[in-house]
Image (cartoon, rainbow, N blue to C red):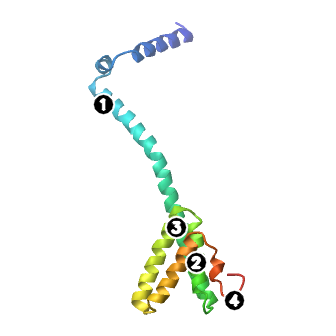
Amino acid sequence: MGVMGAMSAVSQRCFRTAHLSVSQLRARLGPGTMRLCVCLVLLCFVSCASTNALVQGGRFVWDALGGARDMYRAYRDMREANFIGADKYFHARGNYDAARRGPGGAWAAKVISDAREKWQSDVSGRGAEDTRADQEANAWGRNGGDPNRYRPAGLPRRY
């Protein structure tokens, strides 16, 4: 039998096997092999369905890390500038930059802003009015508002 004859015999066997009923297939393959095949098919369905969720989850985490970096950069710039009246601008800018990354960045900005304001109001005693104004600037930036709304006159352009 040549190569074509061997391929023909294999394809005929596969064709006959494909038309078997489940009970005939189980009898031919054996119960252990059948269970393995069912498990593999289910695993394929689960992995295909969860791949999209996994990719989206990874993107959310990546955006959140980038958002945390944006918040840190705004904090570092605020400390470096040491400019009176510029804190609301840096709050808005950090939240704006983080939120532009996507849902993960916006989430990171909210968590960091809320934690910082809670710590600041508990420890520093700056008062509810300052906390409210900071949170307003945070929300403004996070919702896509232009941070320059809070930019004080005389703040160097590099910020």
Residue placed under numbered mark 2 in the picture: 92
43 in relation to 69, above or below: above
Quarter of the figure that contains the C terminus = bottom right
Decide which of 107, 132 is in the foreground and name it.
Answer: 132
Q: Quadrant of residue 42?
A: top left
Q: Nearer the viewer, mark 1 or mark 2?
A: 2
Foreground label between 1 and 3: 3
First of labels 2, 4 by sequence position? 2
Residue drawn at the location 66% of the way across and 79% of the way down: 148
Residue occupying the point 46% across, 92% down: 126
The one nearer the camera, 53 or 129, is 129
**Dot 3: what SS?**
helix
Q: What residue would you read off at disc 3?
A: 106
Position of 90 compared to 116: left or right?
right
Q: Amino acid at mark 1?
A: Arg
Callout 1 crowding tier (Cα within 10 Å): few <14, some 14–19, many ≥20 = few
Alpha carbons under labels 1 and 4: distance apart? 73 Å
Mark pair 1, 3: CA separation: 46 Å
